[in-house]
Each structure stands twice: as structure tokens, then as C-alpha cells.
Amino acid sequence: KTEKAKNPVIDTLELARFLYPEFKNHRLNTLCKKFDIELTQHHRAVFDAEATGYLLLKMLKDAAEKDIFYHDQLNENMGQSNAYQRSRPYHATLLAVNETGLKNLFKLVSISHIQYFYRVPRIPRSQLNKYREGLLIGSACDRGEVFEGMMQKSPEEVEDIASFYDYLEVQPPEVYRHLLQLELVRDEKALKEIIANITKLGEKLNKPVVATGNVHYLNDEDKIYRKILISSARRRQP
């Protein structure tokens, strides 16, 4: 079992989003081309790691020009002004369990559309914690950070992510079928393993694991309206 790293770390993707908000995307190959950093055999771990190292040196120099030298300064700046626009949003399920929760849900819906709308309505985690009373927070679908974490990390690494939620969600394999088509999950066996690992994680953390269906409408005739809404959006939604 690999020992968990205790040293401070920097997410180069989030750092790039903070330093270069004007860029259309912050992919490794895009940034390397922009800064004339050699990247050969992209997606081969050893070459990606080397290019990322050179890219990090470049970004640290640019951060220093903004008088940012320490982790605390980075964290402070990441939370300011329009930082939410640079963060990748995840899906979550919010359920109101009482009147207080219902009022807080209304507040969160309002601020997500008025204060934090950027391409889609967003709720910063700080605001979700502020108005969390009376709400149950579920880990949602494959666009949730627990499922994505299981796709990309070990179950042990996902524990910290899952601890934020009141309950974890799993859905029928058919609901995740598009992940196989997009080759984001290797095969059916790997998909079932992800679902099983989420279930085991819920048991380990003593959190309810709920079987859900990623349902977005109740009546068949409403399907066309959701289809129109999705088609009109700039970015594809599940």
C-alpha cells in the first residue's frame, strides 16, 4: 500500500486556470505549445510528467510576478472575485429535509443563478457549507466528484472527497453506458468495479449508499423540453 503524500501539492490545471483565465482551454498540450515547451508522445506518462515539470516552473515564475510566493497566497487568490469561473463544476444532489433546508435550497438556487452563473449555475463549496443546514447532499451521477474520483484515483484517495457528502449515489450500469462509448471507462467489468468501490466506500465511511437513476423528468412528454434545453446550451449536459 502506497503511503499517502503529506507534502504540500499544487494542481497545475487549477494554477493555469488562475494565471491565464483568458486562454480558451488549459490542456497540457495547449499550454506547452503556448510557452514553447517540448511535449513528445502526449499521454505517455513519462513525457507528460517532464513537460508538466517545465510548465510548473514557468507558472511559478508568472505567479511570482503577481507577488505570489507561498501556498497560502495561492489559496487566498483562488478564492477571490471570479475564481469560481476557473474551477471545474461537479454535479451534486441537494435534498431539503425540513423548512430550513427548503429556504436554504431556495437561497442556493438564487445565488447560483445571480451571483455565480458562468456558463452554468454554480454553487461554491463555501456557500454550500454556509447554507447546508436542513439539506442532504448526495454525490450525484458520473459528473459528480465521487464517481469521477473513482474513475481516476484509488478508493483510498476518494475517501476525503466522499466525506463531504451525506450519502453516496450509484446508478444502473446502463446509465453510465456513454462512458464506455467515450472510452472514459475501459470496459463493463471496470464500470461495475467503480460502482462496487463506491458501495464499499459508503460502508466504510458509514454513509448511506442510494441507488438512483439520474432522472431529469417525470413524464415522457417532458423529454422534448429537456432535449431542447440541452441543445441550446453551449456545453453538453448529461
Image (cartoon, helix red, strand yellow):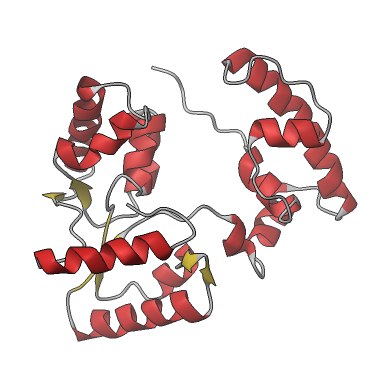
Question: Which of the pair 81/187 is nearer the observer?
Answer: 187
Query: How far across and how far down the image is residue 51, in percent?
Result: 72, 23
Which residue does the image show at 38% across and 83% down from the upper left?
107
Where residue 11 sits, quadrant-wise, is: top right
- Residue 44 versus residue 173 in the image, above or below: above
User: Is 224 left, or right, of 51 in this rendering?
Assistant: left
User: Is 14 left, or right, of 64 in this rendering?
Assistant: left
- Is residue 10 at all visible to an observer of this figure? no
User: Is 142 left, or right, of 124 in this rendering?
Assistant: left
Query: How far across and how far down the image is residue 6, in percent?
Result: 55, 33
Query: How far across and how far down the image is residue 85, in percent?
Result: 59, 62
Number of callouts in the render?
A: 0
Which residue does the image show at 29% across and 37% down from the upper left?
178
- Residue 197 versus residue 67 in the image, above or below: above
- Residue 8 versus residue 138 in the image, above or below: above
Where residue 225 sits, quadrant-wise, is: bottom left
Which residue does the image show at 65% across and 55% down from the upper left?
75
Where the N terminus falls, by quadrant? top left
Query: How far across and how far down the image is residue 76, in percent?
Result: 68, 60
Where residue 171 sits, quadrant-wise, is: top left
